[in-house]
Image (cartoon, rainbow, N blue to C red):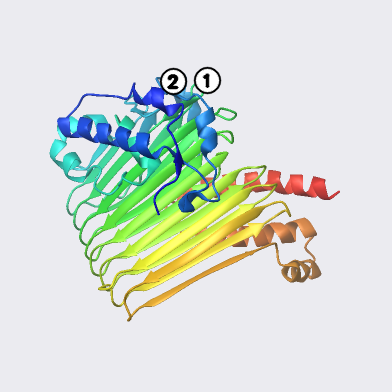
Amino acid sequence: MSQVAEKPGVFAGALEKRPTGGPRWLDDLRNRGAAKFAALGVPTVRDEEWRFTNVTALNAIDFALAGPMSGAADRLNGFAYTDAPIRLVIVNGRFDTTLSRTKALPAGTVAGSLAVALKDHADVVQRYFGQLADFTSRSFVALNTAFVQDGAFIHIPEGAIVETPIHVIYVSGADGSTVMAHPRTLIVAGANSQAKVIESYIGAKGETYFTNAVSEIFVGENAGVDHYKVQEESLDAFHIASLHMHTSRNSRFSSHSFTLGGKVVRNDANAILDGEGGDCTLNGLYLADRDRLVDNHTVIDHAKPHCGSHEVYKGILGGSSRAVFNGKIIVRQDAQKTDAKQTNRALLLTNGATINTKPQLEIFADDVKCTHGAAIGQLDENAIFYLRARGLPYAEARDMLIHAFAAQVLDGVRIEPLRDALEAELFAQLAKDLAEVDNAAR
């Protein structure tokens, strides 16, 4: 379906000030991205892919292109695993060498500024950049492409094993000004390599800004990449992001997404299993309260036979918050012996919270095993009664059930300090949400 959209609105003026320079192919890509966004505009609820997520409010806010930020180092405090031994810090879309740490990288592995990589690793960047993030029908990918200037570049060479996680931290905001940033991440893992990469998005509380992120990940033959996305932005911020990944023969990719912030959030995850024996995991956990909106759209495309995919998305919703889950699994005609499983579950803490869920299967092969399912509801009163009958107070019984609900996704985090930090933040937020629920019930 063709995209139904509003015209660029306030973005039109910003597009005239988009960055220029660099390689000719990149400038051409920016121009094509700008032209496509001018044609597509901001999607509306008349577009099937955005029918439950209204982002036209973006046209009413005069976002300025974010510049340098004061006190960026202080903004790292209090967020999950920001003290990582290997970290790349990008402030308002620009790589910050003073805050980044790369000395612990093994020899041959490159992790740093995308702008620098355009010069120092031009052959690799040109070969992979923009190959997965198609902007011909995606407004915000086109907008990101029009503004691309810097971001994170990670290249794991063939056969390299990177034991220490690489943490990419995107910091947004401008001391109360309404700004926008368009961060870009490019990760290329060579054959037989292994790595863990974290993408974090953070910002100061109470600030209104727009983060529009695009990430592309290529996993070579027999390689493995564990990817974690942690979104802890301001509860007044807009966050729209798309993750695009490509697997090769016998490669393995896992992505674990945690949405703990943002007023309006849209996460797109698109995976192409393009080699026999490939395996993909897409998991997500999101928490929303007040009138916040969290939208997760996923696509797993089984293009080759003998591949497996596993997907679990869970949401915990309070207040009058809303969530959207649209998960599609595509099995191509030649993708025999596909084994795909998809699960979406949402826990509604209040009567005012809602979710629209749409699991989808498009199967063009006949020798496959594919399952999908969705479950939405409130806490099981029988389970609470069982726990209370064994001496637990109501609040403890309820908390235990909520923790068990979230544990399936949290347990998939293989980086212990990150998992501990996520658990602490998640349950701290839940404590506040449940206190509000209890107060409203009195």
Extreme residue in the bottom direction: 367
- Quadrant of the rendered structure where residue 25 is? top left
Residue lying at 33% horizontally and 50% vertically, measured from the top left:
244
Residue lying at 26% horizontally and 42% vertically, measured from the top left:
154
Q: Distance between the residues labelled 1 and 2?
A: 8 Å
Residue type at the position of mark 2? Met
Q: Mark 1 points at which residue?
A: 175
| Crowd tier of the residue under label 2, counting other residues whose Cα lies within 10 Å: few below 14, some 14–19, many 20 or above | some
Q: Where is residue 210 in the image (x, y as percent from the top left)?
A: 48, 32
Secondary structure state at the residue bearing disc 1: loop
Viewport quadrant of the N terminus:
bottom left
Q: N-terminal of the two: label 1 or label 2?
A: 2
Instruction: Describe residue 147's horizontal placement relative to residue 240 as left or right.
Output: left
- Quadrant of the rendered structure where residue 150 is? top left
Q: Position of residue 300 (x, y in %)?
A: 37, 61
Residue type at the position of mark 1? Asp
Secondary structure state at the residue bearing disc 2: loop
| Crowd tier of the residue under label 1, counting other residues whose Cα lies within 10 Å: few below 14, some 14–19, many 20 or above | some
Q: Can residue 105 be seen in this view?
A: no
Q: Position of residue 51 (x, y in %)?
A: 53, 51
Tag shown at residue 346: none
Q: Which of 272 and 32 is in front in this view?
A: 32
Q: Is residue 215 visible?
A: yes
Q: Position of residue 272 (x, y in %)?
A: 30, 59
Q: Mark 2 points at which residue?
A: 69
Q: Is residue 142 above or below residue 342?
A: above
Q: Do the residues labelled 1 and 2 touch (CB within 8 Å)?
A: yes
Instruction: Describe residue 147's horizontal placement relative to residue 328 as left or right.
Output: left
